Amino acid sequence: MPQHAPTARICRDCDGFPMVAITTGTRRTDGTRATLRITCPTCKGTGTTTPAASFVRAGR
């Protein structure tokens, strides 16, 4: 049986992983690493490329 494509298109820049944690290399006093959370600028952290639903005016 053929596989169906996903309903939402995956962002080509982040490949569906819209948020990542990057370590800064420094450690806090309790021993944990300091990290930065970065979101994909293309999809704005959604992971998909489908535009948000909006109203379209048709006719006159």
Image: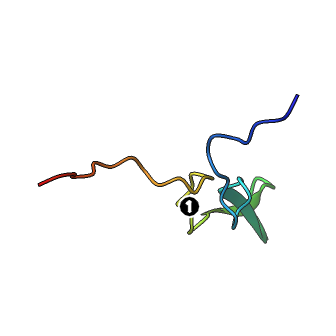
**Residue at (63%, 53%) from the top-left corner?**
47
Q: Position of residue 23 (x, y in %)?
A: 77, 66
Looking at the image, the residue that sits furthest to the bottom is: 25
Residue at the spot 21% in from the left edge and 52% down from the top edge: 57
* 12 relative to 42 in the view: left or right: right
Residue 13 picture quarter:
bottom right
- In front: 18, or 27? 18
Query: Could you say which is closer to the camera, residue 29 or residue 49?
Result: 49
Q: Which residue is mark 1?
A: 43
Dot 1: what SS? loop
Q: Is residue 6 left or right of residue 44?
A: right
Which is nearer the eye, 27 or 40? Answer: 40
> Does residue 33 appear anywhere in the picture?
yes
Q: Residues within 10 Å of mark 1 (few under 14, many from 20)?
A: some
Residue 28 visible: no
Expressed as whole percent of the image width and height from the top left, the position of residue 41 reads: 56, 69
| Residue 2 to residue 29: above or below | above
